[in-house]
Image (spheres, rainbow, N blue to C red):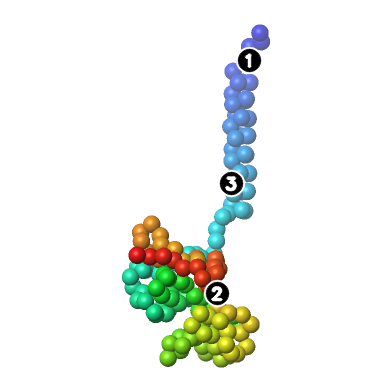
Amino acid sequence: MATRSRRSVLRLFGEAGFGVLALQAVWSTVRFARAPVSYAPPMRRSLGEPGEYAAGTAVYVEDAGVFVLRDANGLRALSATCTHLGCTVRKNAGGDGFTCPCHGSRYDTEGNVIAGPAPASLSFLSLRVDKRGRLEVDLAAEVDAKQRCKVA
């Protein structure tokens, strides 16, 4: 069995240390180049307590850009973004629907187009109650108009 000199053992440790350092540098560079950073706003927004929304109302929540509608069957979130050019629709004074102030598109109380240049109805968005008992809307998840969030 051949014995190694002290110099060859130290050289081996030095090369191994340099190799580990080089691999760490490469790994760090790759991770930096593929950083999982999102500059988009979060797609889920908290809307407060379910009790804040009275039955038969359409309450606009500015932070989320949605109307929260409550009826006897539960709560729904209706997007307030006009399908024509993305303006924010407003609730009509009589409570009989929504109107886009930019180009005059009109929608009924269910978000269906009744007049104007808008090509499609307003979208209903996923609404749920989170762990803390607060409403949360997912702005990226459209749902059927019949789907409701059941609350006590």
Q: Amino acid at mark 3?
A: Ser
Residue 93, image quadrant:
bottom left
- Establish if 13 lies above or below 122: above
Number of marks present in the image shown:
3
Residue at (42, 80) in percent of width and height: 58
- To which residue does mark 1 refer? 4
Q: CA distance from mark 3 to mark 2?
A: 43 Å
Question: In the rendered view of the protein, which quadrant contains the N terminus?
Answer: top right
Residue 85 in sight here:
no
- Establish if 30 lies above or below 128: above
Label 1 or label 2, whichever lies nearer to me, is 2
Label 3 or label 1, whichever lies nearer to me, is 3
Q: Amino acid at mark 2?
A: Ser
Q: Earlier in the sequence, mark 1 or mark 2?
A: 1
Residue 38: image location, x then y, percent: 55, 61
- Nearer to me, 150 or 106: 150
- Establish if 74 lies above or below 83: above
Residue at (58, 84) in percent of width and height: 113
Residue at (54, 88) in percent of width and height: 106
Q: CA distance from mark 3 to mark 1?
A: 35 Å
Q: Amino acid at mark 1?
A: Arg
- To which residue does mark 3 refer? 28
Residue 54, image quadrant:
bottom left
- To which residue does mark 2 refer? 123
Residue 20 in sight here:
yes
SS for callout 1: loop
Question: In the rendered view of the protein, which quadrant contains the C terminus?
Answer: bottom left
Residue 63: image location, x then y, percent: 44, 74
Q: Which residue ends up furthest to the left in the rendered image?
A: 51
